[in-house]
Image (cartoon, rainbow, N blue to C red):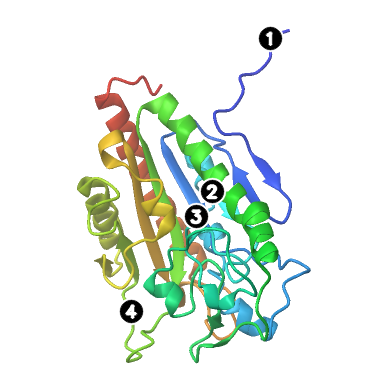
Amino acid sequence: MTRPPVPIIPTCTLPGVLTMLGPTGPVRPLLLDSPHSGTDYPADFDVAVDQDTLLDAVDTAVDELFGAGPELGAALLKAHFPRTYIDPNRAADDLDARILDGCWPGPLSPTEKTRRGNGLIRRTIGDDDRALYDRRLGVEEVQERICRYHAPYHRARGEAQDRLMERFGAVYHLNCHSMGSRSREDMTRRPDIVLGDRDGTTCEAEFTILAAEVLGGLGYQVRTNHIFKGVELVRAFSAPGAGRHCLQIEINKDLYIDEATRRLRPDFASVQADLAQLIDRLAAFAEERAVEAGRDVA
């Protein structure tokens, strides 16, 4: 009996950690990930704030907004654990030593965001930058979080990219987020959508331009590399010269949820449908690039 072919990227779940949804339609060289939509809070997450405050830090329903990806041929990776527990969009050494009850066994490379409290392991949360913990964390405790949550997410992300590279010779990645509707500094409304390619360093310009044109054509106000430029999950996995292209997208939360209650707005389905159009156009672009590179994408 002939066995069915093994999927390039199979659907799989690591309970409490992540789910990779493999393409259900014909596979295309596009990978989506939602690293900040998780709300499975580990039992050892002992914090000094209430649940509502923790939920304010979640990219609510972003994994659902981009849920059409698999049927359109794109793999979709999503985290189950919350970014407040450990942030997969930070490097494993992007850690503030002030949060540790002990000496870290190696060099640390905290960024400016980490110094302000928003690193691999958060120190602060909320608009008032309140302390997330009333204690310091043990070194082994943090190492365990990296081992059980951060490392598997990065491994799944990298393996999916490698499989698409092997098949298509190029891969395009859309790193999916949402943002608060208003600036913390002056409370002005942020754009509908912000795209980030770290000032043109993480993907070819045509990919970013296409995303902006598609979204603009759908009526959204789009800015590029304004406020948010992309962090670790676009930086670490990008190499445009080698065919690895990464773009971050931030969706203004008030387009699809009530920020006070986190309930979906009636417009949610409309935004979701618009993002499905975006996914389809970006996947078609990626296929064209694979054909130009001499790959058979049929």
- Residue occupying the far top of the picture: 1
Query: Which class describes the residues within 10 Å of circle 2: few (<14), some (14-19), or many (20+)?
Result: some
- Cα distance in 3D space between marks 3 and 2: 19 Å
Depth check: give the residue in front, 128 or 226.
128
Instruction: Name the residue that disc number 4 marks.
Output: 190
Q: Amino acid at mark 4?
A: Arg
Instruction: Name the residue that disc number 3 marks.
Output: 66
Instruction: Name the residue that disc number 1 marks.
Output: 2
Query: Which class describes the residues within 10 Å of circle 3: few (<14), some (14-19), or many (20+)?
Result: many
Local SS, label 2: helix
Q: Which mark is residue 212?
A: none
Residue drawn at x 28%, y 47% is 203
Dot 4 or dot 3: first in sequence order is 3
Depth check: give the residue in front, 282 or 295.
295
- Cα distance in 3D space between marks 2 and 1: 34 Å
Dot 4 or dot 2: first in sequence order is 2
Dot 2 or dot 1: first in sequence order is 1
Instruction: Name the residue that disc number 2 marks.
Output: 154
Q: Amino acid at mark 3?
A: Phe
